[in-house]
């Protein structure tokens, strides 16, 4: 499915609150004070918009919203409500007050206006003389007398305004009282007052709001919204609320976490063909993740799986768990990110945690360790979220591909790099020549003992190209099936694996991979385990018996394959002399890698670190028993001492 199509159809889930909204609207027929209870982000505002739609349609009552926590602290809430509910009366009173003050100032002479009123007398004399020729002087006299008497009450009113303003200033009269008096008698009957996010208000403002509610109680429908539990932490608030609330209403059941996430789980099942574990699903409900949380989660799901093209490169449930960690458990996510070279250590710590989420996360991320696509434990980089948009364009990438040195640098980019973000998002936008050049360069780098997150991604893409994997498709009624590519029809798992192996073997041989590098490639990128490769690499036996080491890039993988063929993995006491002789000839880096694969040592830093733990015993996860490593340590004692003289640090650890 293309990105644009998926964006259009991605999780169309409109929560139906129409019946609940109709029932709520009926409560507004009387002038009740209703408390709509709900935590932040639970859909209260969305539900109220639906109620408002029904109220306007059936009762002709419009909603007036007051976000009190956004108002100016210097303004009375009664005045604020006055302005919101009856704006025309509010501004009329304000104009009257301003007019009174202006007249007061002018009549007291506090401000001198640069205007000579004698101009009016001169103008009148001019008019009088002009019209004397027309014999209408009696009319002008009448007008003059009428105007004189008319201005007498205006002058008297001006004097009263001066006295009123002066007394109010002297006694510091608060006009909010007049607002309350006037407002209380002019409450509109065709409006519903909504006080949103009441629980966010500081305590002084909440008490001011109580005065407003007392003034308006029973005069118009009032809805105030918030979390009842947050507000009533103060016992006084609970007592007051009980006096002014006529009814407390909960949000519709369809907005509860158990309902809103059930549709998401069903969507994941039908869209991706997986059933999320019950432990993971319970976390969403127990932690009460609301509609706002759901919107964020779905946005990142779409971003990571489709925009960044991870769908066929990650275990879906594990990716969703990482998204959940990023959004709601940032501390855990940061631990995973910072310690990506020591994920197994972090998993052990999480497993022993008292936090249910951390225990669940550890269990979920370790259960699919041998499946494909590769799980988080074996390739964490591709699962991390990357929010910085790429600054590269396709044309810029293709231009940089022409420079071999620059290309090598780009392919060694880390998972937080701009290039890595571009590749996993827009690899398929590149032309076929550029895609091939990227892959060939990646193989060459790996054959020269290099690896990176970009190389891992390119190998994964090539594996999809060789033989696509089954893709889940919805078949309706919550069921799903797999769309099987033509290449896989009527083929067993063994036959499918063999096709992949033969294709990869040809590619690796063409790229001049020796036997050791071929083995390393298959194991490193989880294309196969040692055991399955044994029938195709039987000649490793003669190589080990002959102690041929220097002819191979990664001789430790030849030895590991040979031990696997003997079924002697970790069985140190059963190893024949030829094995110990081969170990003795291994180069330092190969020896350290071999010992890590046998759980004898563990790197405690990054990949280039020279700090290791030397484990006298290791836990066998198959038997849950401790394995003694002292025989191996004794056999390689001289080598370890030499490495210690070369700045390597080995700290002995007894894990039992």
Image (cartoon, grey):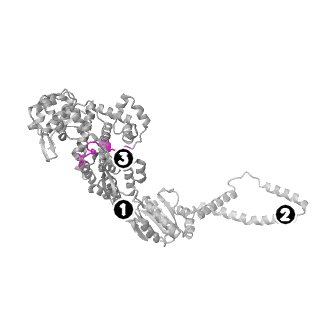
Give whichever of discs 3 and 1 has the lower sequence position.
Answer: 1
Callout 2: helix, strand or loop?
Answer: helix
Position of residue 598 in the picture relative to residue 115 (left or right): left
Quadrant holding the C terminus? top left
Residue 220 image offset from top left, x and y in percent: 51, 70
- Distance from Cα at disc 3 to Cα at disc 1: 26 Å
Give the side of residue 462 with respect to residue 80, left or right: left
Quickly name the residue at label 1: 256
**Displayed quadrant of residue 156:** bottom right
The count of marks equals 3
For the point 40% across and 37% down, the residue is: 431
Task: Give the residue pinned by disc 3.
Answer: 304
Task: Mark 1: give few (<14), some (14-19) or many (20+) Cα within 10 Å.
Answer: some
Q: Main secondary structure of the magenta part?
A: loop
Which residue appears at 67% of the width and 64% of the height?
160
Instruction: Determine whether the residue tagged by mark 3 lies in a helix, strand or loop.
Output: helix
Which range is magenta? 365-386
């Amino acid at each position: 499915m293309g990105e644009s199509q998926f964006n259009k159809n991605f999780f169309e889930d409109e929560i139906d609150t129409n019946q609940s909204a109709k029932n709520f609207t009926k409560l507004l027929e009387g002038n009740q004070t209703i408390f709509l209870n709900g935590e932040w982000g639970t859909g209260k505002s969305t539900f109220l918009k639906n109620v408002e739609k029904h109220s306007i349609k059936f009762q002709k009552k419009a909603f007036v919203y007051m976000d009190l926590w956004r108002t100016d602290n210097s303004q009375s809430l009664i005045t604020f409500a006055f302005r919101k509910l009856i704006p025309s009366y509010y501004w009329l009173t304000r104009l009257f007050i301003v007019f009174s003050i202006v007249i007061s100032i002018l009549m007291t002479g506090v401000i001198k206006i640069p205007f000579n009123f004698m101009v009016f007398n001169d103008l009148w004399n001019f008019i009088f003389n002009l019209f004397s020729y027309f014999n209408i002087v009696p009319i002008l006299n009448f007008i003059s007398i009428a105007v004189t008497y008319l201005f007498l009450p205006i002058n008297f009113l001006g004097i009263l305004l001066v006295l009123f303003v002066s007394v109010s200033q002297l006694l510091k009269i608060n006009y909010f009282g007049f607002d309350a008096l006037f407002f209380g008698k002019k409450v509109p009957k065709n409006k519903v007052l909504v006080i949103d996010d009441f629980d966010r208000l500081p305590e002084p403002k909440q008490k001011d709001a109580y005065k407003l509610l007392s003034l308006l109680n029973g005069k118009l429908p009032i809805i105030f919204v918030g979390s009842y539990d947050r507000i009533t932490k103060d016992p006084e608030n609970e007592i007051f609320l009980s006096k002014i609330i006529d009814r407390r209403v909960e949000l519709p059941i369809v907005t509860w976490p158990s309902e809103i996430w059930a549709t998401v789980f069903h969507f994941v099942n039908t869209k991706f063909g997986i059933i999320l574990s019950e432990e993971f699903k319970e976390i969403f409900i127990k932690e009460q993740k609301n509609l706002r949380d759901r919107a964020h989660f779905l946005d990142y799901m779409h971003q990571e799986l489709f925009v960044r093209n991870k769908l066929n490169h990650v275990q879906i449930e594990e990716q969703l768990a990482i998204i959940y960690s990023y959004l709601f458990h940032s501390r855990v996510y940061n631990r995973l990110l910072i310690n990506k070279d020591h994920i197994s250590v972090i998993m052990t710590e999480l497993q022993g945690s008292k936090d249910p989420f951390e225990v669940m996360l550890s269990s979920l991320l370790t259960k699919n360790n041998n499946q494909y696509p590769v799980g988080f434990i074996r390739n964490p980089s591709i699962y991390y979220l990357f929010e910085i948009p790429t600054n590269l364009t396709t044309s810029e990438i293709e231009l940089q591909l022409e420079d071999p040195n620059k290309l090598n640098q780009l392919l060694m980019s880390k998972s937080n790099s701009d290039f890595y973000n571009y590749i996993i998002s827009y690899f398929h936008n590149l032309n076929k020549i550029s895609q091939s050049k990227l892959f060939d360069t990646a193989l060459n780098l790996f054959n020269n003992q290099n690896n990176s997150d970009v190389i891992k991604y390119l190998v994964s893409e090539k594996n999809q190209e060789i033989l696509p994997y089954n893709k889940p498709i919805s078949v309706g009624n919550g069921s799903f099936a797999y769309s099987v590519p033509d290449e896989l029809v009527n083929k067993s798992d063994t036959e499918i694996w063999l096709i992949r192996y033969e294709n990869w073997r040809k590619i690796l041989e063409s790229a001049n991979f020796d036997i050791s590098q071929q083995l390393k490639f298959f194991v490193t990128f989880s294309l196969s385990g040692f055991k399955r490769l044994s029938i195709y690499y039987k000649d490793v036996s003669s190589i080990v018996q002959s102690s041929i080491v220097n002819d191979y890039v990664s001789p430790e993988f030849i030895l590991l394959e040979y031990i696997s063929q003997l079924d002697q993995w970790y069985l140190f006491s059963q190893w024949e002399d030829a094995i110990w002789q081969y170990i003795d000839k291994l180069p330092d880096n190969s020896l350290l890698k071999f010992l890590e694969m046998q759980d004898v040592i563990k790197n405690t830093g990054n990949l280039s670190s020279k700090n290791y733990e030397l484990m006298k015993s290791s836990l066998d996860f198959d038997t849950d028993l401790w394995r003694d490593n002292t025989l191996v340590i004794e056999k390689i004692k001289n080598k370890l001492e030499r490495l210690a003289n070369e700045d390597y640090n080995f700290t002995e650890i007894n894990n039992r």
